[in-house]
């Protein structure tokens, strides 16, 4: 069941931290996303919450007695996994307390002074990957993306017969998930051109990005105990941005018969802040409306609540900054803009299907949504789709062309949610710059 609205979502409430009240601010009082940071003078990472251009130090707040005793020990840890393991009631209690402490309507001068002492300027902090990720599974939940890619390789049958029945996914590599700002080195691997007799081992020539959301697992499930669709969101803490870097030429040679391998596991980038599902409650929308003639989900993937509010109306965009653009101080160029509400499968369905065979998920596991693409060209979430595998090069405003990414290119993902009844909240940024292949 999706989280209910409460006073923490009230768009009229402001914070005593003025930068949180600026129009279009990513991190207003209604957001309160969680992350890990290291401040000057400290060695170990600490849990924190973004508010305006500040970080509220949860470790310091817990030590100072500002947080509920039910969550304080978890907030003193060097990773967020213990907090994720506590479950939705504890998360909601913590969110309510933080909203009280950081709200402009806080009456106690003593509490405000204590809270102010827990603030760290975001500009002076180093942000880290927010959780220890034990397992990473990437899905393929956009029918538009699947059809666009399928049409390039199978024009007569873009979608395989199983697609509309089953949330397709593969197990990725957790060790190569990196935080925003970490450079990504161009991978080497086997690739074979269509007119070649044999493959070569060389640097990837078709490096691509994929615009995705990462969903973070909260409480896990025991081995052998599936999670029902009705309970699935109780096992999901929140989301961040995810760039699933892809070596398309390596992928096209290796993926048969077992799917992606080295073409995907060299790097995936996540943004540093996890926006809780509770923060996104005002932006719930019905699950994607399946076209007439599509099959209904099988009973274990079907439910009235999921149909009513299983979708998330989050706006996502991709920008490109090339070396030449940075030299001339040109703004990054927007490659695409899409909406997460266009996904064929909901996050709850992804988690339910993942556990349907008894697979046990762990706190901090990441479920990648798969590339977020929509019905029009401007909403395609990868260069593979935008340039039709390089056949239709993308022309940039400064005259440069791109079929795929070149060394020195930086990809920037951004996301936000907004509607007239709620405060704008953001997911921040997810950045990665391409370095040349190693020796």
Image (tube, rainbow, N blue to C red):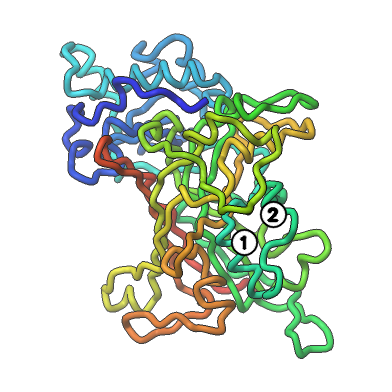
Q: Nearer the viewer, residue 52 or 284?
A: 284
- Across and down, in percent, residue 390 comes to 56, 81
Whether pointer 2 and pointer 1 mark residues with C-beta atoms closer than 8 Å, the reply is: yes
Give the crowd class for mark 2: few <14, some 14-19, many >=20 residues within 10 Å: some
Give the crowd class for mark 1: few <14, some 14-19, many >=20 residues within 10 Å: many
* Residue 383 higher or lower than 355, as above or below: below
Q: Element type at marker 2?
A: loop
The answer to which image quadrant residue 346 occupies is: top right
Q: Is residue 108 left or right of residue 408?
A: left
Q: Element type at marker 1?
A: helix
Q: CA distance from mark 2 to mark 1?
A: 9 Å
- Across and down, in percent, residue 73 comes to 50, 16
Q: According to the image, label 1 marks what residue?
A: 146
Q: Nearer the viewer, residue 204 or 309?
A: 309
Q: According to the image, label 2 marks what residue?
A: 163
Q: Is residue 94 left or right of residue 152?
A: left
């Amino acid at each position: 069941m999706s989280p209910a609205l409460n006073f923490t979502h009230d768009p009229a409430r402001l914070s005593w931290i003025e930068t949180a009240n600026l129009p279009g601010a990513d991190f207003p009082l209604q957001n309160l996303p969680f992350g890990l940071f290291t401040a000057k003078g400290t060695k170990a990472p600490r849990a924190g919450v973004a508010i305006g251009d500040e970080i509220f130090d949860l470790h310091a707040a817990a030590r100072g007695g500002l947080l509920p005793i039910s969550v304080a020990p978890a907030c003193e840890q060097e990773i967020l996994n213990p907090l994720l393991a506590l479950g939705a009631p504890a998360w909601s209690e913590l969110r309510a307390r933080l909203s009280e402490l950081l709200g402009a309507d806080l009456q106690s001068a003593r509490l405000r002074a204590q809270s102010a002492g827990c603030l760290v300027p975001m500009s002076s902090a180093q942000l880290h990957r927010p959780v220890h990720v034990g397992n990473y599974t990437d899905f393929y939940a956009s029918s538009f993306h699947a059809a666009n890619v399928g049409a390039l390789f199978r024009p007569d049958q873009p979608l395989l017969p199983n697609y509309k029945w089953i949330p397709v996914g593969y197990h990725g590599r957790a060790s190569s998930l990196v935080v925003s700002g970490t450079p990504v080195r161009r991978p080497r691997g086997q690739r074979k051109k269509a007119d070649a007799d044999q493959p070569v081992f060389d640097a990837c020539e078709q490096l691509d990005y994929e615009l995705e959301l990462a969903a973070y697992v909260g409480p896990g499930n025991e081995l052998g105990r599936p999670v029902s669709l009705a309970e699935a969101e109780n096992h999901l803490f929140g989301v961040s941005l995810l760039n699933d870097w892809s070596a398309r030429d390596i992928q096209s040679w290796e993926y048969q018969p077992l799917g992606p391998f080295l073409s995907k596991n060299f790097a995936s980038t996540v943004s540093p802040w996890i926006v809780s599902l509770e923060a996104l409650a005002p932006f719930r929308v019905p699950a994607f409306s399946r076209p007439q003639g599509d099959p209904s989900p099988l009973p274990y993937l079907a439910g009235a609540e999921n149909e009513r509010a299983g979708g998330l109306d989050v706006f996502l965009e991709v920008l490109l900054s090339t070396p030449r653009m940075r030299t001339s101080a040109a703004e990054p160029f927007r490659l695409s803009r899409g909406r997460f509400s266009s996904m064929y499968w909901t996050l709850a369905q992804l988690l339910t299907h993942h556990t349907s065979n008894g697979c046990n998920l762990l706190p901090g596991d990441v479920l990648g949504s798969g590339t977020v693409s929509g019905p029009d060209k401007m909403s395609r979430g990868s260069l593979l789709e935008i340039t039709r595998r390089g056949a239709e090069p993308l022309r940039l405003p400064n005259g440069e062309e791109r079929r795929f990414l070149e060394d020195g290119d930086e990809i920037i993902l951004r996301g936000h949610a907004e509607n007239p009844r709620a405060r704008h909240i953001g997911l921040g940024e997810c950045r990665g710059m391409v370095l040349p292949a190693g020796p």
